[in-house]
Image: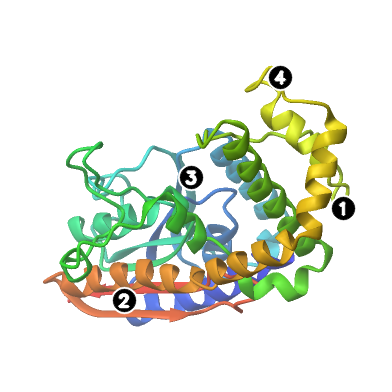
Amino acid sequence: MSAKKRHEVEHLAAFISHVARSAGVNNLIDLGAGQGYLSSVLALRYGHNVLGVDTDPVQTSGAIRRRATLFKRVRHKMESPGRLMYLNKHMTATDTFNESVDWSAERWGLIGLHTCGDLSPITLRMWEASSATLVINVGCCYNHISEETPDTGPVTPGFPMSQAVAAHNVHLGWTAKMLACQSTCRWTTQGDRAKEAFRRHVYRALLQEWLVSATGGVSPVVSVHTSKVRRGGLPTFAMYWREAVGALLRDHGPTADIEAWYSRRIAEGALKQIALVWTLRAMMAEAIESLILVDRYMWVREQQSVQRTVLFPLFDHVESPRNCVIVGIKQ
């Protein structure tokens, strides 16, 4: 377990156990359980009965193997461990789990650590539709959130969820959702990694400029898959350019001309121009993420059965940028 994951699991497990005990909940279903880091701590350290659910059979198999190893290592140290089970299942908002386990007739809760994309909205809707008393969720991967569009037709969107936000006809789009995933708070701690990320952005911006010029104003969408290189070993712009356009344009000129064009654009101040736009764009990241989180919070508040709902940052923002937890407790 990485230092980041350990930080998240330690803090969230302690918080979940405290809130669950206060709400009279001992049984928990961990959605998007992955390798079972959170569920195993809740069961073995805090004594909760936990069912870990994941749609990926590889992750579920890994969690089962890890459970066996943990029980061998710490069985003699445990006073009263809870039951720890795992289930491979594709989850939808209509799942209730009311009949899945023999303790679901008691007070139980839904939890999730960094549930990807629509799994966070699914978790919240599942909590509302089921007999679950408690929901505690930390989301991530906002770029995978679904939205209702004229092309998709009626769907149950991941955004917006609440009537409060939907009333303003807000549509994020792919670019805004990608921006919400940015972690600008970590730039100063990443050193060369942050510089390399920016250099790749410069490459992509100048590639687009070249494409528009070379195609007479047409701006084709190009997916750039450059050869894997070691960190800090970013290829030259000419290599990047050739891999991007080689399959798109037959006559794309000699590499030397492209490298000269790139050097000229940098000398003309392209680096500063791109840095300015990139920074202004990235500064919107936390505002967009806040909108997504507030939408989920407002949706929970709008449910008639809710007694209390809370949204607050639980993890260190630099250590774990996706740090906000949503809590809902039914009456």
Instruction: Using the image, determine if residue 215 lies above or below residue 269.
Output: above
- Point out the image quarter for the C terminus: bottom left
The residue drawn where x is 43% and y is 81% is 312
Q: Residue at x 68, y 48 (%)?
A: 206
Compare marks 4 and 3 and give the one earlier in the sequence.
3
Q: Secondary structure at mark 3?
A: strand
Circle 3: residue type: Tyr
Classify mark 2: helix, strand or loop: loop
Rendering quarter of residue 2: bottom right
Which residue type carries mark 1?
Answer: Gly
Q: Secondary structure at mark 1?
A: loop
Tags 4 and 3 touching, CB below 8 Å:
no
Tag on residue 232?
A: 1
Name the residue at 83% across, 63% down. Answer: 192
Mark 4, secondary structure of its residue: loop
Instruction: Compute the Cα span from label 2 to label 4.
Output: 70 Å
Q: Is residue 286 left or right of residue 310?
A: right
Residue position for label 3: 86
Q: Which residue is mark 2?
A: 24
The mark that comes first in sequence, 1 or 4, is: 1
Q: Is residue 284 left or right of residue 76?
A: left
User: What separation in Å lies between label 4 and label 3 (alpha carbons)?
Assistant: 55 Å
Query: In terms of sequence position, does the residue under pointer 3 or pointer 1 come before the other?
Result: 3
- Disc nearer the start of the sequence (3/2): 2
Amino acid type, mark 4: Asp
Give whichever of 281, 75 is nearer the camera: 281
Label 4 crowd (10 A; few <14 / some 14-19 / many >=20): few
Residue under label 4, please give it. Answer: 251
Q: Nearer the viewer, mark 2 or mark 4?
A: 4
